[in-house]
Amino acid sequence: GRRVHVRPRLVQNPVPHPSSFSQDTTSTIFGKMPFLRRAFENLKARLDEGEEPSHDEQATMIPATILMISGCRDAQTSADVSNVQEFCLPDPAGKAGGACTSALLRVLYNDERTPETDLSYVQVLEGLRDELEDGFTQVPQLSSSRPFDLENPFVIGAGTGTRRALLVGINYVGTGGELSGCHNDVINIKKYIMEVHGFEEDNIVVLMDDGENAEPTGSNIMRELERLAEESESGDSVFFHYSGHGASIRDDNGDEKDGMDEALCPIDYATNGLLRDDTIYTSFIAAMQEGVRAICLMDCCHSGSIMDLPYTYRPGSGDNVFVQNPRFKFGKFLRIFGAAVREVFK
Protein backbone atom coordinates (compact mmCIF):
# COMPACT_ATOMS: atom_id res chain seq x y z
CA GLY A 1 0.00 0.00 0.00
CA ARG A 2 0.96 3.62 -0.27
CA ARG A 3 1.41 4.28 3.43
CA VAL A 4 4.45 6.09 4.71
CA HIS A 5 5.46 6.71 8.31
CA VAL A 6 7.00 10.10 8.98
CA ARG A 7 8.06 11.69 12.24
CA PRO A 8 5.81 14.70 12.92
CA ARG A 9 8.84 16.85 13.73
CA LEU A 10 9.84 16.77 10.07
CA VAL A 11 6.57 18.25 8.89
CA GLN A 12 6.53 21.87 7.87
CA ASN A 13 3.69 24.20 8.83
CA PRO A 14 3.44 26.72 6.00
CA VAL A 15 -0.08 27.98 6.76
CA PRO A 16 0.27 31.68 7.64
CA HIS A 17 -0.88 32.98 11.01
CA PRO A 18 -3.48 35.76 10.77
CA SER A 19 -1.10 38.26 12.35
CA SER A 20 1.25 37.83 9.39
CA PHE A 21 -1.21 39.43 6.96
CA SER A 22 -0.49 43.08 6.24
CA GLN A 23 -3.00 45.64 5.01
CA ASP A 24 -1.38 45.40 1.57
CA THR A 25 -1.92 41.64 1.55
CA THR A 26 -5.56 42.08 2.51
CA SER A 27 -6.11 44.62 -0.26
CA THR A 28 -4.37 42.37 -2.77
CA ILE A 29 -6.54 39.39 -1.85
CA PHE A 30 -9.79 41.32 -2.23
CA GLY A 31 -8.53 43.23 -5.28
CA LYS A 32 -7.73 40.03 -7.18
CA MET A 33 -10.77 38.16 -5.92
CA PRO A 34 -13.78 40.50 -5.52
CA PHE A 35 -15.93 37.40 -5.13
CA LEU A 36 -14.41 36.98 -1.67
CA ARG A 37 -15.34 40.50 -0.63
CA ARG A 38 -18.96 39.89 -1.59
CA ALA A 39 -18.99 36.56 0.24
CA PHE A 40 -17.45 38.04 3.38
CA GLU A 41 -19.87 40.96 3.40
CA ASN A 42 -22.86 38.64 2.98
CA LEU A 43 -21.69 36.48 5.84
CA LYS A 44 -20.98 39.53 7.99
CA ALA A 45 -24.59 40.66 7.53
CA ARG A 46 -25.81 37.25 8.67
CA LEU A 47 -23.58 37.27 11.74
CA ASP A 48 -24.63 40.81 12.60
CA GLU A 49 -28.19 39.49 12.76
CA GLY A 50 -27.08 36.74 15.12
CA GLU A 51 -27.54 33.97 12.54
CA GLU A 52 -25.13 31.11 11.98
CA PRO A 53 -24.27 30.73 8.27
CA SER A 54 -25.47 27.42 6.87
CA HIS A 55 -23.18 24.79 5.45
CA ASP A 56 -24.17 25.84 1.92
CA GLU A 57 -23.48 29.50 2.66
CA GLN A 58 -20.10 28.64 4.13
CA ALA A 59 -19.26 26.59 1.04
CA THR A 60 -19.74 29.65 -1.20
CA MET A 61 -16.51 31.01 0.27
CA ILE A 62 -14.67 28.75 -2.19
CA PRO A 63 -14.68 30.84 -5.38
CA ALA A 64 -13.95 28.14 -7.99
CA THR A 65 -15.71 24.93 -8.94
CA ILE A 66 -13.34 22.23 -7.70
CA LEU A 67 -13.87 18.48 -7.89
CA MET A 68 -11.71 15.70 -6.51
CA ILE A 69 -11.74 11.98 -7.24
CA SER A 70 -9.95 10.14 -4.46
CA GLY A 71 -9.00 6.50 -4.48
CA CYS A 72 -9.92 5.91 -0.85
CA ARG A 73 -11.27 7.46 2.36
CA ASP A 74 -8.98 9.14 4.88
CA ALA A 75 -8.56 5.99 6.97
CA GLN A 76 -7.78 3.79 3.96
CA THR A 77 -4.65 3.07 1.97
CA SER A 78 -4.29 2.95 -1.78
CA ALA A 79 -2.47 0.23 -3.68
CA ASP A 80 -0.38 -0.56 -6.73
CA VAL A 81 -1.51 -2.82 -9.54
CA SER A 82 1.20 -5.35 -10.38
CA ASN A 83 0.41 -5.42 -14.09
CA VAL A 84 -1.63 -2.72 -15.80
CA GLN A 85 -2.06 -4.93 -18.85
CA GLU A 86 -4.78 -6.65 -16.82
CA PHE A 87 -6.71 -3.38 -17.26
CA CYS A 88 -5.98 -3.11 -21.03
CA LEU A 89 -4.33 0.29 -20.53
CA PRO A 90 -2.09 2.13 -22.97
CA ASP A 91 1.16 1.00 -21.40
CA PRO A 92 4.23 1.41 -23.58
CA ALA A 93 6.60 0.68 -20.69
CA GLY A 94 4.72 -2.35 -19.38
CA LYS A 95 5.15 -1.28 -15.78
CA ALA A 96 2.79 -1.23 -12.81
CA GLY A 97 0.13 1.40 -12.23
CA GLY A 98 -1.81 2.80 -9.29
CA ALA A 99 -5.04 0.99 -8.49
CA CYS A 100 -7.24 4.11 -8.66
CA THR A 101 -5.68 5.53 -11.81
CA SER A 102 -5.68 2.18 -13.60
CA ALA A 103 -9.29 1.46 -12.65
CA LEU A 104 -10.46 4.92 -13.71
CA LEU A 105 -8.74 4.60 -17.07
CA ARG A 106 -10.33 1.24 -17.60
CA VAL A 107 -13.73 2.91 -17.15
CA LEU A 108 -12.93 5.95 -19.30
CA TYR A 109 -10.28 4.81 -21.79
CA ASN A 110 -10.27 1.03 -21.97
CA ASP A 111 -7.85 -0.20 -24.65
CA GLU A 112 -7.39 3.45 -25.71
CA ARG A 113 -11.05 3.75 -26.68
CA THR A 114 -13.63 6.02 -25.09
CA PRO A 115 -17.14 4.73 -24.27
CA GLU A 116 -19.62 4.89 -27.14
CA THR A 117 -21.93 7.08 -25.08
CA ASP A 118 -21.12 9.75 -22.52
CA LEU A 119 -20.88 8.43 -18.97
CA SER A 120 -22.41 10.33 -16.07
CA TYR A 121 -20.53 11.05 -12.86
CA VAL A 122 -22.56 8.31 -11.21
CA GLN A 123 -21.58 5.80 -13.88
CA VAL A 124 -17.92 6.74 -13.70
CA LEU A 125 -17.78 6.48 -9.90
CA GLU A 126 -19.77 3.26 -9.85
CA GLY A 127 -17.49 1.84 -12.53
CA LEU A 128 -14.46 2.88 -10.51
CA ARG A 129 -15.90 1.24 -7.40
CA ASP A 130 -16.66 -1.97 -9.30
CA GLU A 131 -13.13 -2.15 -10.68
CA LEU A 132 -11.60 -1.59 -7.25
CA GLU A 133 -13.86 -4.18 -5.61
CA ASP A 134 -12.07 -6.83 -7.66
CA GLY A 135 -9.12 -7.40 -5.36
CA PHE A 136 -8.94 -4.07 -3.52
CA THR A 137 -10.62 -2.80 -0.36
CA GLN A 138 -10.37 0.93 -1.01
CA VAL A 139 -13.60 2.89 -1.55
CA PRO A 140 -13.47 5.80 -4.02
CA GLN A 141 -15.36 9.03 -3.60
CA LEU A 142 -16.06 12.29 -5.39
CA SER A 143 -15.77 15.58 -3.51
CA SER A 144 -16.85 19.00 -4.75
CA SER A 145 -16.97 22.67 -3.81
CA ARG A 146 -20.47 22.81 -5.35
CA PRO A 147 -23.32 20.30 -5.40
CA PHE A 148 -24.55 19.48 -8.89
CA ASP A 149 -26.56 16.83 -10.73
CA LEU A 150 -24.43 13.67 -10.73
CA GLU A 151 -26.34 12.39 -13.75
CA ASN A 152 -24.60 15.07 -15.84
CA PRO A 153 -21.96 13.82 -18.30
CA PHE A 154 -18.50 13.37 -16.78
CA VAL A 155 -16.03 15.93 -18.13
CA ILE A 156 -12.47 16.95 -17.29
CA GLY A 157 -11.98 19.89 -19.63
CA ALA A 158 -14.98 22.23 -19.77
CA GLY A 159 -15.59 25.63 -21.29
CA THR A 160 -13.71 27.44 -24.02
CA GLY A 161 -10.80 28.75 -21.98
CA THR A 162 -7.26 27.44 -21.55
CA ARG A 163 -6.83 23.91 -20.21
CA ARG A 164 -3.88 23.47 -17.86
CA ALA A 165 -2.64 20.34 -16.09
CA LEU A 166 -0.16 19.36 -13.40
CA LEU A 167 0.76 15.67 -13.33
CA VAL A 168 2.84 14.35 -10.42
CA GLY A 169 4.17 10.80 -10.28
CA ILE A 170 6.58 9.72 -7.53
CA ASN A 171 8.10 6.23 -7.35
CA TYR A 172 10.56 7.17 -4.54
CA VAL A 173 13.30 5.38 -6.44
CA GLY A 174 16.00 3.92 -4.24
CA THR A 175 14.12 4.42 -0.96
CA GLY A 176 12.51 1.97 1.45
CA GLY A 177 9.09 3.19 0.32
CA GLU A 178 9.67 2.69 -3.41
CA LEU A 179 6.59 2.33 -5.60
CA SER A 180 6.46 0.94 -9.12
CA GLY A 181 3.41 2.42 -10.80
CA CYS A 182 3.34 6.17 -10.38
CA HIS A 183 5.37 7.14 -13.44
CA ASN A 184 3.18 4.94 -15.56
CA ASP A 185 0.07 6.59 -14.08
CA VAL A 186 1.29 9.96 -15.33
CA ILE A 187 2.15 8.61 -18.80
CA ASN A 188 -1.31 7.08 -19.18
CA ILE A 189 -3.23 10.05 -17.77
CA LYS A 190 -1.30 12.49 -19.93
CA LYS A 191 -2.16 10.52 -23.07
CA TYR A 192 -5.81 10.39 -22.02
CA ILE A 193 -6.31 14.09 -21.29
CA MET A 194 -4.49 15.12 -24.48
CA GLU A 195 -6.31 12.76 -26.82
CA VAL A 196 -9.76 12.87 -25.23
CA HIS A 197 -10.05 16.23 -23.46
CA GLY A 198 -7.99 18.52 -25.65
CA PHE A 199 -5.18 19.45 -23.26
CA GLU A 200 -2.11 20.71 -25.13
CA GLU A 201 1.48 19.69 -24.42
CA ASP A 202 2.58 23.27 -23.73
CA ASN A 203 0.00 23.57 -20.94
CA ILE A 204 0.91 20.32 -19.15
CA VAL A 205 3.58 20.25 -16.44
CA VAL A 206 4.97 16.85 -15.45
CA LEU A 207 6.89 16.29 -12.21
CA MET A 208 8.46 12.81 -11.86
CA ASP A 209 11.51 11.31 -10.17
CA ASP A 210 12.63 9.69 -13.42
CA GLY A 211 15.74 11.75 -14.15
CA GLU A 212 14.09 13.34 -17.18
CA ASN A 213 11.36 15.62 -15.82
CA ALA A 214 11.58 18.20 -13.06
CA GLU A 215 11.79 16.61 -9.60
CA PRO A 216 8.53 16.32 -7.61
CA THR A 217 9.91 18.14 -4.58
CA GLY A 218 7.59 19.90 -2.17
CA SER A 219 8.66 23.32 -3.43
CA ASN A 220 8.18 22.33 -7.07
CA ILE A 221 4.72 20.88 -6.45
CA MET A 222 3.59 23.94 -4.52
CA ARG A 223 5.08 26.34 -7.06
CA GLU A 224 3.12 24.67 -9.86
CA LEU A 225 -0.12 24.57 -7.84
CA GLU A 226 0.27 28.26 -7.07
CA ARG A 227 0.99 28.97 -10.74
CA LEU A 228 -2.22 27.17 -11.76
CA ALA A 229 -4.21 29.31 -9.33
CA GLU A 230 -2.44 32.49 -10.43
CA GLU A 231 -2.74 32.00 -14.20
CA SER A 232 -6.17 30.43 -14.48
CA GLU A 233 -9.07 32.75 -15.19
CA SER A 234 -12.83 32.41 -15.50
CA GLY A 235 -13.65 29.86 -18.20
CA ASP A 236 -10.37 27.95 -17.82
CA SER A 237 -10.06 24.29 -16.81
CA VAL A 238 -7.46 22.78 -14.50
CA PHE A 239 -6.51 19.12 -14.01
CA PHE A 240 -4.26 18.01 -11.13
CA HIS A 241 -3.18 14.37 -10.90
CA TYR A 242 -1.10 13.05 -8.01
CA SER A 243 0.18 9.47 -7.84
CA GLY A 244 2.42 8.66 -4.90
CA HIS A 245 2.48 8.23 -1.15
CA GLY A 246 -0.05 9.90 1.14
CA ALA A 247 0.05 10.19 4.92
CA SER A 248 -2.14 10.86 7.93
CA ILE A 249 -0.30 12.86 10.59
CA ARG A 250 -1.10 14.69 13.79
CA ASP A 251 -2.98 17.96 13.25
CA ASP A 252 -0.77 20.90 14.21
CA ASN A 253 -3.33 23.70 14.53
CA GLY A 254 -6.51 22.18 15.99
CA ASP A 255 -8.70 22.44 12.89
CA GLU A 256 -9.27 18.68 12.41
CA LYS A 257 -12.04 16.93 14.35
CA ASP A 258 -10.18 13.64 14.30
CA GLY A 259 -6.90 15.30 15.31
CA MET A 260 -5.19 14.30 12.06
CA ASP A 261 -4.08 16.13 8.93
CA GLU A 262 -3.92 14.44 5.55
CA ALA A 263 -0.78 15.09 3.52
CA LEU A 264 1.05 14.39 0.29
CA CYS A 265 4.60 13.05 0.34
CA PRO A 266 6.93 14.84 -2.10
CA ILE A 267 10.19 13.18 -3.04
CA ASP A 268 12.05 15.23 -0.40
CA TYR A 269 9.53 14.72 2.43
CA ALA A 270 12.13 13.21 4.76
CA THR A 271 14.20 16.40 4.79
CA ASN A 272 11.73 19.16 3.90
CA GLY A 273 8.47 17.82 5.27
CA LEU A 274 5.06 16.85 3.93
CA LEU A 275 2.48 18.93 2.09
CA ARG A 276 -0.40 19.19 4.53
CA ASP A 277 -3.99 19.63 3.42
CA ASP A 278 -3.89 23.12 4.98
CA THR A 279 -1.06 24.10 2.62
CA ILE A 280 -2.88 22.83 -0.45
CA TYR A 281 -6.07 24.58 0.65
CA THR A 282 -4.26 27.88 1.10
CA SER A 283 -2.35 27.97 -2.16
CA PHE A 284 -4.67 26.10 -4.50
CA ILE A 285 -8.28 25.71 -3.33
CA ALA A 286 -8.82 29.13 -1.74
CA ALA A 287 -6.66 30.94 -4.30
CA MET A 288 -8.39 29.66 -7.46
CA GLN A 289 -10.45 32.39 -9.09
CA GLU A 290 -14.19 32.44 -9.58
CA GLY A 291 -15.28 30.79 -12.84
CA VAL A 292 -12.38 28.34 -12.98
CA ARG A 293 -13.20 24.63 -13.03
CA ALA A 294 -10.63 22.24 -11.56
CA ILE A 295 -10.73 18.47 -11.23
CA CYS A 296 -8.19 16.58 -9.16
CA LEU A 297 -7.37 12.88 -9.21
CA MET A 298 -5.62 11.81 -6.01
CA ASP A 299 -4.19 8.28 -6.17
CA CYS A 300 -2.65 7.98 -2.73
CA CYS A 301 -3.38 6.82 0.81
CA HIS A 302 -5.56 8.91 3.14
CA SER A 303 -6.83 11.06 0.27
CA GLY A 304 -10.51 11.29 1.19
CA SER A 305 -10.40 14.89 2.42
CA ILE A 306 -6.99 16.05 1.22
CA MET A 307 -8.74 18.97 -0.54
CA ASP A 308 -11.17 19.69 2.34
CA LEU A 309 -14.19 20.23 0.07
CA PRO A 310 -17.73 20.72 1.47
CA TYR A 311 -19.66 18.03 -0.47
CA THR A 312 -19.03 14.33 -1.06
CA TYR A 313 -20.51 11.44 -3.01
CA ARG A 314 -19.65 7.79 -2.50
CA PRO A 315 -20.92 5.27 -5.04
CA GLY A 316 -23.25 2.71 -3.51
CA SER A 317 -24.11 4.98 -0.57
CA GLY A 318 -27.81 5.28 -1.46
CA ASP A 319 -29.24 8.19 -3.42
CA ASN A 320 -27.01 9.45 -6.21
CA VAL A 321 -26.63 12.91 -4.73
CA PHE A 322 -23.98 14.88 -2.92
CA VAL A 323 -24.15 15.05 0.86
CA GLN A 324 -22.63 17.64 3.13
CA ASN A 325 -19.13 16.74 4.26
CA PRO A 326 -19.08 17.07 8.06
CA ARG A 327 -15.28 17.39 7.92
CA PHE A 328 -15.48 20.61 5.88
CA LYS A 329 -13.89 23.31 8.02
CA PHE A 330 -15.13 26.83 7.34
CA GLY A 331 -12.81 28.15 10.03
CA LYS A 332 -9.80 27.10 7.97
CA PHE A 333 -10.80 29.49 5.19
CA LEU A 334 -11.26 32.33 7.65
CA ARG A 335 -7.91 31.65 9.29
CA ILE A 336 -6.13 31.65 5.93
CA PHE A 337 -7.35 35.16 5.21
CA GLY A 338 -6.72 36.27 8.79
CA ALA A 339 -6.42 40.03 8.54
CA ALA A 340 -9.06 40.23 5.81
CA VAL A 341 -11.49 38.35 8.00
CA ARG A 342 -10.83 40.56 11.02
CA GLU A 343 -11.39 43.67 8.92
CA VAL A 344 -14.73 42.52 7.48
CA PHE A 345 -16.08 40.79 10.57
CA LYS A 346 -15.08 43.48 13.10
Image (tube, rainbow, N blue to C red):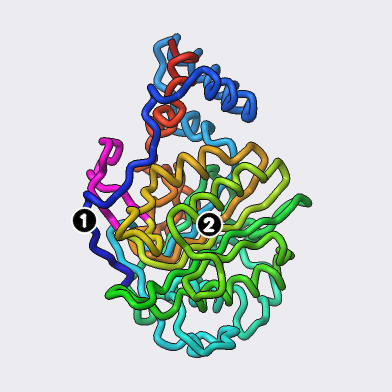
Is residue 334 visible in this depiction of the protein? Answer: yes
Is residue 129 visible in this depiction of the protein? Answer: no
- Residue 155: image x %, image y %? 65, 60
Q: Residue at x 38, y 51 (%)?
A: 275
**Front one among 2 and 40:** 2
**Front one among 314 and 13:** 13
Q: In the rendered structure, find residue 296 and report the number of the disc placed on it.
A: 2
- Residue 236: image x %, image y %? 70, 48
Image height of 122 relative to 252, above or below = below
Number of numbered discs on residues: 2
Q: Quadrant of the C terminus?
A: top left
Q: Residue furthest right?
A: 160
Q: Residue at x 51, y 38 (%)?
A: 286
Q: Report which residue position mark 1 lands on.
A: 7
- Check if residue 265 falls in the magenta segment: no
What amino acid type should be assigned to the residue bearing mark 2?
Cys
Sequence-first disc among 2 and 1:
1
Determine the image quadrant of residue 55.
top left
Image height of 294 relative to 134, above or below = above
What amino acid type should be assigned to the residue bearing mark 1?
Arg
Image height of 68 relative to 245, above or below = above
- Residue 217: image x %, image y %? 44, 59
Question: For the residues marked 2 and 1, what is the alpha-carbon distance in whole angstroms?
Answer: 27 Å
- Residue 11: image x %, image y %? 29, 50
**Front one among 127 and 319:** 127
